[in-house]
Amino acid sequence: MDLNLIFIVIGQIVVILAIILVIIVLITSILGSITMLNKRLILPNVLIHILPTTAPILKYILRIIGKDELIIDRLNINITNSLNKHSFKQLDAKDVIMVLPHCLRGVDCPAKLGTSGLECVQCGKCSIGHFEAIAQEKDIAIYVVPGSTFVKRVIKQRPFVGVIGVACPVDLNEVMMSLSNYIVMGVYLLNDGCIHTMVNEDDVIELMNILKPVTNYKVNSDGNIVN
């Protein structure tokens, strides 16, 4: 076969693949934009499959135009939550683990680091104590970990079917994708940083409440957990 013809065929294939990729990126952008603007997921089963492929390109574009690239991670988390929520609600609380980042703790947190992460003493100085109190009542295994190494360690300590994860959008998105064999729900942090971060407590507690047996725990005006 003529060498020039081979190069022509290869070039045509590359162009076709590039066009297909552009089309996929455009579809992802359109569906993602509609989802973010209307706060309603459009074709989540399509997005969940194409977003991981197009995410690097979309993030690059967002960086160039000076926009928040974490939108992509948040979108993927929201899609995963939407697809998993029905199955998650069918789970018994004892079959679920919760993984929290150590950066949620207060600056003067008295908890010590053990083999399974921070050992919360429910001092009331951060939201972790609230989650710990509910987890004890519902028999949800809760782990407060300083990094991904601990995550790999704790998931081997107790059999589980579902996971509630809390982390910054990038880390949470990566963890949720790596645990795709489980029923995973995630709540991303409201601010960045390695210390004294914050999360929407109501969103986390709602996920704990919908697990069987269904409960109605909440934080009252005095900062105490009531059911």
Image (tube, rainbow, N blue to C red):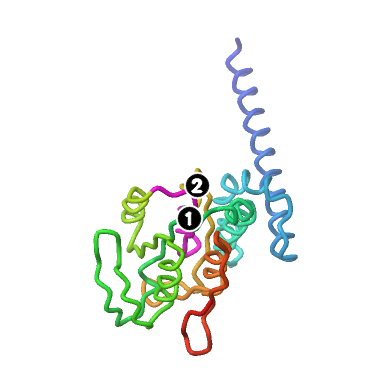
Q: Nearer the viewer, residue 130 or 102?
A: 130
Q: In the image, what residue occupies the spot 46% across and 76% down?
A: 198
Residue range in magenta is 159-175
Q: Is residue 58 visible?
A: no
| Residue denoted by label 1 | 163
Do the numbered discs 1 and 2 sit on residues whose CB atoms are within 8 Å? yes
| Residue denoted by label 2 | 182
- Where 142 sits versus 80, above or below? below
- Mark 1 belongs to which amino acid? Val
Q: Is residue 177 visible?
A: yes
Q: In the image, what residue occupies the spot 53% across and 85% down?
A: 220
- Mark 2 belongs to which amino acid? Tyr
Distance in Å between CA atoms under marks 1 and 2: 7 Å
Q: Residue 101 is drawn in which quadrant?
A: bottom left
Q: Earlier in the sequence, mark 1 or mark 2?
A: 1
Q: Position of residue 91 (x, y in %)?
A: 54, 53
Q: Which quarter shows the N terminus?
A: top right
- Where 126 sits versus 131, above or below? below
Q: Nearer the viewer, residue 187 or 47?
A: 187
Q: Secondary structure at mark 1?
A: strand
Q: Position of residue 194 (x, y in %)?
A: 37, 71
Q: Is residue 1 left or right of residue 161?
A: right
Q: Secondary structure at mark 2?
A: loop
Q: Is residue 86 left or right of residue 170?
A: right
Using a 10 Å C-alpha cutoff, classify the residue at mark 1 as few (fewer than 14 neighbours), some (14 to 19) or many (20 or more). Answer: many
